[in-house]
Image (spheres, rainbow, N blue to C red):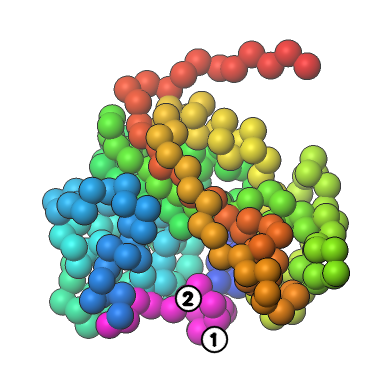
Amino acid sequence: MSNAHNHNRQVWDDRARCGFPHTEAAGDAQFANPWRWIDDCGWLGGNPSGKRVLCLAAGGGWHGPLFAFVGAEVTVVDLSPEMLARDSEVARQRGLHLRVVESSMDDLSAFREAQFDIVIQPVSTCYVADINRVYREVARVTGTGGIYISQHKQPINLQADTNGSGRGYTVAEAYYRTGPLPPAPERSIHRETGTLEFLHRWDDLLGGVCRSGFVIEDVAEPRHGDPHAQPGTFRHRSWYIPPYITFKARRTSAAPGPRLWIP
């Protein structure tokens, strides 16, 4: 496991212990209307009963328990044991069954080929350097015709400054950069302070999922922006900069051949 993996595991363990954003477990409001929280785009048809669902890099007691609640056969994979402990605790409290596996999103060697019908991945690929490796692993464990729903931070979200001005937000990082991004400011509301994040370009975000053996069926950009919000807040920045994007992709029978690139 890489240094970045070990670093992010420790940071997410600490964030979970402190109850920081994105570590909150699902509660009564979410269980009262689970579909609003696990399928807000309506891509799953409202009936995953009996489906084999992998919640990838999705620890924290949210996606896994909610999918188990609506009848899916659930496995949760996450790098952080503290985040996985929340899934186990919520499942115990609600009388639900799910499996938790501690591993990174780019190492699914614990699973056989075509083991899952649905893979759900909330925003998380920014924490690995090689998103294509993640896609290849997901393709391997997803059965033909299976669905992969994933969310990703948009490149501009990671390029732009977090402090607003009268003219918006400054692009401070190069698009064609390598290596981890500079650390996020303390108590940032736009990035997860302490984590190592990597910027992935559209060629890999979109092209990579197709080259791994999926066909993209739909794309959604959830709108969180408010032009009247206080500058620097999540909603004000989101009016100028889309924070993330969601893909729905379907596994084909075989991965395509290598792409020819002519500069």
For this rendering, which residue is in front, 43 or 12?
Answer: 43
User: Does residue 21 appear left or right of residue 180 in this picture?
Assistant: left
User: Does residue 123 appear left or right of residue 192 in this picture?
Assistant: left
* Residue at 21% over, 53% down: 46
Mark 1 neighbour class, 10 Å CA radius: few under 14, some 14 to 19, many 20 or more: few
Extreme residue in the bottom direction: 18
How far from the left and from the top, in percent, is residue 115? 26, 41
For this rendering, which residue is in front, 19 or 151?
Answer: 151
Element type where label 2 sits in the image? loop
* Residue at 64% over, 13% down: 260
In primary-sequence order, the first of circles 2 and 1 is 1
Give the residues in magenta: 13-28
Q: Are marks 2 and 1 in contact (CB under 8 Å)?
A: yes
Pointer 1: what residue? 18
For the C terminus, the image quarter is top right
Pointer 2: what residue? 23
